[in-house]
Amino acid sequence: MKNIFYILLLFISLSACNEYQKALKSEDISTKFKLGEALYNEGKFSKANKLFVQIVPNYRGKPQAEKLMYLYANTFYKMEDHYVAGYQFDRFATSYPKSEKVEEALFKSAESYSFLSRVYSKDQTETNDALAKLQTFINVYPDSEYLEQANALVKELQTKLEKKAFSTAKQYNTIGDYQASISSFDNFIIDFPGSSFREEALYYRYNSAHLLGTKSVERKKKERLETAKSYFNAFKKAYPDSEFLKDSDDLSKDIEKQLEQYSTKS
């Protein structure tokens, strides 16, 4: 009985495979559509996709086109071909703006683009593109069933941008380009006011300002040290119990000591 079962299973499998190969070679677009949809419903997205790609041009303008284009886009989504999925869902939403699937399509488009976002240390063009699409989706569908997922993706992508901006500013501090470091931290503090990196950003801005003032030519030294002093006051006021406070106090004492010479001269 067991052998008969395996033989039957093999026969069914070979028959299905033969049917699929015949459909691929067939010129009957309805056969391709019917089998492609059946394979799609069985979760065989790659096979379904190969059939759909052959017939998409033939169905343009036909009543079945909306359904086909959605299934076609979703096969890319299911196969995790994120770039093509995003493009195809955008195309679907543009072609069928009144479809009951358009909300889902726009969310899956934005989600697909978010998957293309690179690690924070790399270029973040894709991250910004995904954020723009997600924000548009949230604005258009504020009560969407996908809202929680969209907001979670926005938070994840914004955190990535924060890490990128913070690491860039800190890198300038590390390599000794203190003016660029201060400017980058200024922008970071404005752009990400609620960031978890804010404390470190205020500290390293102050640290960079202290080093810039200390290493400046004489005609610029006093002004830059006073700027560093103002950064220290801003940091200490915001984080009076900071883990960086001891180091900050030591730098402050050094600033005061260097500024004393200007008081003596005046």
Image (tube, grey):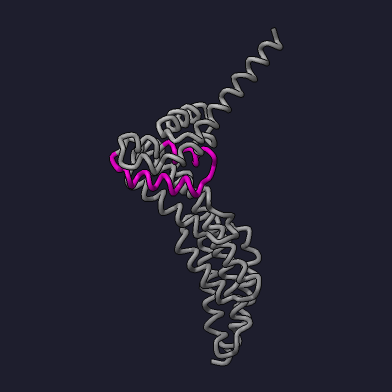
> Could one spot residue 224 in this view of the protein?
yes
| Residue placed most toward the observer, 129 or 211 | 129
Residue 197 sits above or below residue 257 on the image = above
Extreme residue toward the top, this view: 1
Q: Residue 224: give x, y in percent of width and height.
A: 54, 81
Residue 92 is inside the magenta segment: yes
Q: Is residue 68 left or right of residue 18?
A: left
- The residue furthest left is 98
Q: Tally the marks.
A: 0
In depth, the one of 118 and 35 nearer the eye is 35
Magenta stretch contains residue 18: no
For the N terminus, which image quadrant? top right
Nearest to the observer: residue 13 or residue 163:
13
Q: Is residue 251 above or below residue 120?
A: below
The spot of residue 129 in percent (x, y) is: 45, 56
> Looking at this rendering, what residue extends furthest in the bottom direction?
265
- What residue sits 59% from the left and 75% below the top? 178
* Residue drawn where x is 51% and y is 35% of the image: 24
From what the image shows, is residue 175 above or below residue 27?
below
- Residue 21 or 99: which is nearer the viewer? 21
Dominant secondary structure, magenta: helix
User: What residue is at 35 percent from the left and 38 percent from the top?
Assistant: 65
Q: Kindly identify the residue that appears in the image at 46 percent across and 58 percent down.
A: 193
Instruction: Looking at this view, name the residue that lies furthest to the right.
Output: 3
Asked if residue 239 shows in the view, the reply is no
Instruction: Specify the segment rendered in magenta.
Output: 71-98
Q: Position of residue 62 (x, y in %)?
A: 31, 38
Q: Position of residue 44 (x, y in %)?
A: 54, 31
